[in-house]
Amino acid sequence: MMHIINWIFLIITDVFLVLLLVSSILEKEKRAACLSFLAAAVNSVVWIFFILFLSISWVSVVNTAILVLSMGMVILSLIKFFPSRPERDLSNVEQYDERDYMFSRNMLQFHPHLLEKYYSANPEKKEIDQKILQKPELGEPGHVFYDEYYSPLFEAAFTYLRSTRSAARGEAASEKQEIQTDKFVRAIKEMACYYGAVDVGITRLKPYHFYSHAGRHAENWGEKIQSTH
């Protein structure tokens, strides 16, 4: 009987680890793939050892203990420890001001007139911001994540984003097209997954989903954001 149980555990656990290995390879996660392979190898050795040497008393005791522990963990994992979360009340959620965003506050050092205006209204944030500004910028030598070869990559990404901002501007189309919602949603999800998203969801736009005031760029800093969607 114990031999059969051991074989069942060997097959189930190895199938799980092999699936994990395949998934890691498909996602090009080398570290996860290596760990999955090692785990599958060790798992196979352990259960085969139990099957071959079950007649030895201490092996039988250890085997039984591991089986009981494993079954106990499976049972515990199926128990719902936490009740379902109650639905959050979002009726009073306030919009966030983009001027308070840390990247926006960091940008103020290049615009003295905005810097004075912001800290006149928010003096409590000035001290901590000055301490942060004394540290190296993201991508600069001395920064904790600085790397001679990799740092220019995200610097280039920021430069690209700045240079393409104008492409997102323009007048809305005067003629509106009728769309099939299901096809439109499917197209958005397929494109998002194509560009690397793991999960995609669609929700109705609410005011608290976007900032109350612009604060990332000097040209429209402080302007109230109007939803035109």
Image (cartoon, rainbow, N blue to C red):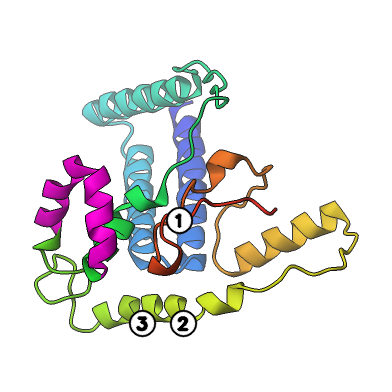
Mark 2 is surrounded, within 10 Å at the Cα level, by few (under 14), some (14 to 19) or many (20 or more) other residues, namely few
In the image: residue 158, left or right of residue 87: left
Residue located beneath label 2 in the image: 163
In the image: residue 182, left or right of residue 118: right
The magenta-colored residue range is: 111-132
Question: Tag 3 or tag 1, which sits nearer the N-term?
Answer: 3
Amino acid type, label 1:
Ala
Residue 150 seen in this snapshot: no
Q: Residue at x 18, y 43 (%)?
A: 123
Q: Residue at x 18, y 40 (%)?
A: 124
Q: Could you say whether the residue bearing mark 2 is in a helix, strand or loop?
A: helix
Residue located beneath label 1 in the image: 214
Residue 1 x %, y %: 49, 25
Q: Residue at x 33, y 48 (%)?
A: 100
Labels 1 and 2 touching (C-beta < 8 A): no
Judged by depth in the image, the label closer to the viewer, 1 or 3, is 1
Q: Residue at x 41, y 51 (%)?
A: 98
Question: Tag 2 or tag 1, which sits nearer the N-term?
Answer: 2
Asked whether residue 38 is drawn in magenta, I would say no
Q: Main secondary structure of the magenta part?
A: helix
Judged by depth in the image, the label closer to the viewer, 2 or 3, is 2
Q: Could you say whether the residue bearing mark 3 is in a helix, strand or loop?
A: helix
Q: Could you say whether the residue bearing mark 1 is in a helix, strand or loop?
A: loop
Mark 3 is surrounded, within 10 Å at the Cα level, by few (under 14), some (14 to 19) or many (20 or more) other residues, namely few
Residue located beneath label 3 in the image: 156
Residue 20 x %, y %: 47, 53
